[in-house]
Image: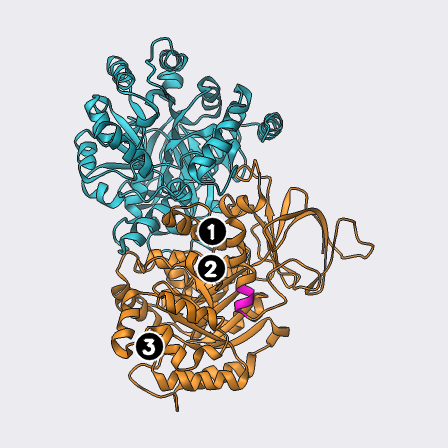
Chain colours: A orange, B cyan
Amino acid sequence: MLFSSIDILRADGTVAAGQFVGVKGKKIEYIGADRPGEDYGRVYDGRGKLLAPGFINSHCHVPMTLLRGYGEGLPLDRWLNERVFPFEDQLDGEAVYYGSLLGIAEMFASGITGFSEMYYFCEDIVRAVLESGISCNMSRSITAFDNTTLVGQHYYREAKELYKRYHGAAEGRLMVDMNIHAEYTNNGPVVAKLTEYAQLNGCRMQIHLSETRKEHEECIGRYGKTPAEFFLEQGLFEVPTTAAHCVHVTESDMEILREKKVTVAHCPTSNMKLGSGIAPVTAMRKKGLNVALGTDGVASNNNFDMIKEMRFAALLQNGVGGDPRLVSPAEVLHMATLAGARGQGREDTGEIAVGKMADLVVVDCASVNMIPCYDRSVNLVYSTKATDILMTLCRGTVVYEDGAYPGLDMERVRTQVVRSLDKISK
Amino acid sequence: MLFSSIDILRADGTVAAGQFVGVKGKKIEYIGADRPGEDYGRVYDGRGKLLAPGFINSHCHVPMTLLRGYGEGLPLDRWLNERVFPFEDQLDGEAVYYGSLLGIAEMFASGITGFSEMYYFCEDIVRAVLESGISCNMSRSITAFDNTTLVGQHYYREAKELYKRYHGAAEGRLMVDMNIHAEYTNNGPVVAKLTEYAQLNGCRMQIHLSETRKEHEECIGRYGKTPAEFFLEQGLFEVPTTAAHCVHVTESDMEILREKKVTVAHCPTSNMKLGSGIAPVTAMRKKGLNVALGTDGVASNNNFDMIKEMRFAALLQNGVGGDPRLVSPAEVLHMATLAGARGQGREDTGEIAVGKMADLVVVDCASVNMIPCYDRSVNLVYSTKATDILMTLCRGTVVYEDGAYPGLDMERVRTQVVRSLDKISK
């Protein structure tokens, strides 16, 4: 594919206008103001359009697409116990597979080319990832309630098997991370054991951290330590970690996260939707933490849409902080791209440069809601609508274009989602 | 037009499934589960779609579309003084006319069928309103700085002429309200005089109220009264009033607004974008105030999109209040429809019922981001994307369908917007 006369969003939020971008195989092979001599196949007329790096959804539970809007309006504990858990108890592999494909399709339509996942039925999610073309850092959610150890636990076996079987699959498109669901769903020895496994095998780690005040304070009650201090003591942060939420982290927690190079997956919509609070993103960024952006599951969002997420993140921080300069459009774009790729350990992803993966999104800049334009990154964050996302490429393959999903049989996905949901008592 | 087998959003947020809706002329003439005997012309297949009342944008400065993203990231006072005012000083009637058409097109694409406006160059905005088919409560922004009186002031003359010439035009599609820009841009005698004019002529009133802390506190410093108390004393609230923002209103201010049946035009995106604060919407609604929803100008939003605005309003109130039940999807839909119509004094608008104006929006409920669906109003508020807005009708006329604007020459609008902006030094 050759993009002709297209504007490119640079990593610093500025734009290189009227460029030619040649994609060969999975990678970007050419960028320049002149038309390349080489033949890149299909030529895409980029006039009036912006080429941006694909967005990275840094925290996600993709099969929860099946629970879009389910149990809405209940407080968090009742929502989980009365609605989400009984629903999830009835899931099977087919439901998870089709729910994942549905979620991945929605991600493609909003320009997401990679995500970090924690759930169970991992084989079924992996199947959807591999078939669809999206990149994924997969992790098997580990919840060792009741002071259990990992010995003999099926989820520990599953996590290890997942890693052995799939880490690096599809030429690295699929990576497998280790997982600790959260402090309150695990215990010290379990955390230590998983940390050891991750270190031995060079895995990364995904966790939830200080999402709610209750979780944060109960941990202090239990151990006299915040969740971040607890994980530090267990040695978890010796493993490259992405910590979702971090809504209630303290100043000294932030120092730990900075020191240990933990990536924060900020999920503002989910946090506000569940009434969890507002993460101190401005303070974390000021300290130099790597803050990325995630949607969380659709059940608490209720979309997989990084355009909505970027806009919301910026408005929330600037609005609550009372200063429109706290998080700039360029900064929130960095959170949604390079910071996410860095959190996933993907150095070949997150920006448009020769030799990088061709994970790309084409945005219409000529629609009624995108003109006039004084700054492309401002309009991209604050004015873009779903109608402006024209095309998404994952590793050089078109996965979404003008409302269609070339690699997915969406009719089958729809039919099977309905069939799966019919079997679940709600 | 006959909508067949379509689901209808009722005023209480519930849905009447599989209905036939017949539109004749400007109005809804038939609603029923059976196909009507009468011929309504074009038949629109409504299967998998939701018919909702058109949204009312309760506070807007439509020509500011020309300033989309202009001067981004500056604090409010510098943004206004260094960027917005010098830009606006160079506007002419043609720029305002085409900027208004561009803004109206964006409103159509997000299902907005009516708006409340305060600006100047009103004749040019009126021209855009009348040509486009949208409904509008127009008002000439009155700013009487420097202790001036209204006598001989061109803006007062313009406001009166506008009212005489256009109030009730296009069979009531255009209404003209009186205006007091804000307390800090006016003085007591001016407010009293405009109130008198409005009362004599039976006009409604549009004002800004307690948008920023500075404005609110400086008023107390000046008069020993809050802006709401100041306007109460001047008798302004004897006129049916819509007050935009109300971010910093006190408990007793809210009592005044309730007692005087003032409609609050809540503009959450603009308030957060400019760092003005978060309006106490939950408290106002609890007191029984009529709270409507507005985008404010595109310069501080940066869209005219009531779907984005509804989602943001609900997330913000529930998130900051720490309780996901504070503002339900049905309640925020009410704010965006009936509460807005009530604020405009339009009893024939804001809900789908026989005899009401056919201001309607058709929403795709079968897209990947709209399934599954457990509650239509939940998905409408939280999951809808711009790609789901299939059609918008203003008073029975299709003004937007599948990306096209049948009544607008968008190529001319685009060309003329560019031409107008070229003349402005930025």
Outermost residue to the front = B221
Callouts 3 and 2 in the same chain? yes
Mark 3 — residue? A185
Instruction: Report crowding for label 1: few under 14, some 14 to 19, many 20 or more residues within 10 A (C-alpha).
Output: many
Q: Main secondary structure of the magenta part?
A: helix
Give the Cα distance between marks 1 and 3. 33 Å
Q: Earlier in the sequence, mark 1 or mark 2?
A: 2
Q: Secondary structure at mark 2?
A: helix
CB contact under 8 Å: marks 1 and 2? yes
Question: Mark 2: which amino acid?
Answer: Arg
Mark 2 — residue? A285
Q: Secondary structure at mark 1?
A: loop
Q: Nearer the viewer, residue B348 or B116?
A: B116
Instruction: Report crowding for label 2: few under 14, some 14 to 19, many 20 or more residues within 10 A (C-alpha).
Output: some
Q: Earlier in the sequence, mark 3 or mark 2?
A: 3
Q: Secondary structure at mark 3?
A: helix
Taking the magenta stretch, the answer to whether it contains residue A342 is yes
Q: Which of the 4 image quadrants contains residue B199?
A: top left
User: Which residue is located at x 28 percent, y 49 percent?
Assistant: B328
Where residue A409 appears, as percent x and y from the top left, is 55, 61
Magenta extent: A340-344
Instruction: Report crowding for label 3: few under 14, some 14 to 19, many 20 or more residues within 10 A (C-alpha).
Output: some
Mark 1 — residue? A327
CB contact under 8 Å: marks 3 and 2? no
Q: Is residue B210 above or below residue A133?
A: above
Where residue A247 appears, as percent x and y from the top left, is 36, 62
Q: Which of the 4 image quadrants contains residue A170?
A: bottom right
Q: Earlier in the sequence, mark 1 or mark 3?
A: 3
Q: Chain of mark 2?
A: A
Where residue A264 appears, as percent x and y from the top left, is 45, 65
Question: Mark 1: which amino acid?
Answer: Val
